[in-house]
Amino acid sequence: MLVTRSSRALAVASAIGLSLLWGIWNQPAGIFAEEVTPPAVTAPQQTQPAEVEIKIPEGTPQELLKFLEDLNGQKGPAEPQAMMQFRQKQAKVFIEVADKILAQDNVPIEVLDGAFQFKFRGLLTLLQMGDSQARELLPKLAEQLMAKAEEVLKGTPTEEIAQNAVQWALMAPRLGGPDLLSRVMVMPKRLEELGFKGMANQVRGSILILRLRMDQSADRAELAKEVTTYLDQAWTQLSQAEKIAREDVAMLVPVLQFLEFSRLELNASDYYGRFGDLFAKNENEEIAGLGRQLQGIGRRLGLVGKKLELAGKTVDGKDFDWSQYRGKIVLVDFFATWCGPCRAEMPNVKANYDRFHAKGFDVVAISIDENRADLERYLQENQLPWVVIHNQDKNAKGPADPATYYGITAVPTVMLVDKEGTVITFEARGEQLGKKLEELLGPPEPSAEEKKE
């Protein structure tokens, strides 16, 4: 498991596009219904309080939405078990009233949007409480989202209304499963017919992301062709544009991010580098910063078989000399003290260091911690026998700022480097590290205990 590195540029890019996702990408219910496994919430065993009653009014869609907004603002009782019952009843009312709104005709788009959000909120609350019946309602919500989106796009909506509709449609497969993808895939063509070419391109990117995540039955070679076509068209459009706006990169960056981990037969390094070079020249510093990060990722992805450049300052303030490691097999380990997987992997790295150091294995750790005190505390508690690099110079450029230079967006990230300084592989964690070292250096030296035996 990788822990994502905090990156303002990537965060901005990810937030540009589909604002209606309601946090679903990071929520337990943020995937289609078959995979929802939310944590159960156990109420304390106390005397059963009186059943909560919430009277549902009649009214127009606008009046019903106002009722939901007011209900959402209610704090509920202080007693824990009574609060649990109130929240459960509140969630069920969210769903029931939202369905009343969605069942009516000619409902304003902003009211429909509010109803969908309240229904989703209600379902998520019930799922977190362990209500198994709520799981069965997710496909129904998915179908409602898709049907309303299709209904809107059949007409002649404004661009803003069309944007709402495609947001609903893109949410639907996340809740109802990949079978709904085919209905979303026809929408870019309709958007172009409506004159919304830019939105159509963004939706194509979103669909590609959904397919890369969800559609395991898709022909990978065919999917690779579609991704190539999308990225090539985006390159042509953006490289010829007089000005690149934040919206222009909205869906491009997530496609690139998935390209890195999707294992499609594509040159991800080339695409990262090309778009990185283009964005890095932008007058908007957010886009330029994103471009520099893309440049780094492209540089890293193309490293296997190439020489690794490395510089910077060690934690004791000395200049790091990468040339001293020629003749050794080196694990370059980007880590952070707040990274759980990094801490979990450290005993394995130490064990292999002890086993293979005498045969020519070494480690160079590069901390991406922003808080120097946290790093120093960690190093005091964990005496590492190898060099640790930590960049505190905000003006450092190139290999002297390794995390930026190589686009490190998640940790741990490791690179195994040969005796000439050439990157061999990025797959050098867990059992793979020991196997690779034995392959390169031969059997490890027996430990002191093994010699006694």
Image: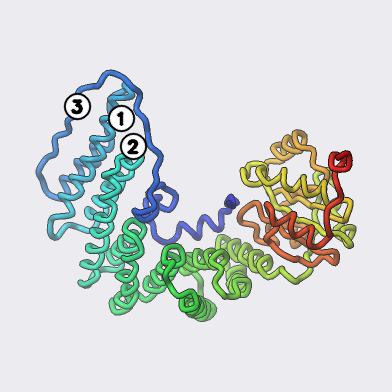
Q: Secondary structure at mark 3?
A: loop
Say which mark, if any, is on residue 51: 3
Task: Name the amino acid, label 1.
Answer: Met
Asked if the residues shown at circle 2 and circle 3 are in contact, with their CB atoms under 8 angstroms apart, the answer is: no
Q: CA distance from mark 3 to mark 1?
A: 11 Å
Mark 2 neighbour density, 10 Å: few (under 14) some (14–19) many (20 or more)? some
Give the CA separation, mark 2 to mark 1.
Answer: 9 Å
Asked whether, in this view, residue 320 is left or right of residue 50, the answer is right
Would you name the residue on which mark 2 appears?
129
**Label 3, residues with CA under 10 Å away: few <14, some 14-19, many ≥20:** few
- What amino acid does circle 2 point to? Met
Dot 1 surroundings within 10 Å: few (below 14), some, or many (20 or more)? some
Residue behind mark 1: 84
Q: Quadrant of residue 59?
A: top left
Q: Position of residue 441 (x, y in %)?
A: 84, 60
Q: Position of residue 419 (x, y in %)?
A: 85, 64
The residue positioned 24% from the left and 50% from the top of the image is 115
Residues at circles 2 and 1 in contact by the CB criterion of under 8 Å: yes
Q: Which one is earlier in the sequence, the residue at label 3 or at label 1? A: 3
N-terminal-most mark, 2 or 3: 3
| Secondary element at image label 1 | helix
Earlier in the chain: of badge 2 and badge 1, it is 1
What residue is at 36 percent from the left and 40 percent from the top?
128
Give how far across and how far down residue 38 sits, in percent.
Answer: 39, 43
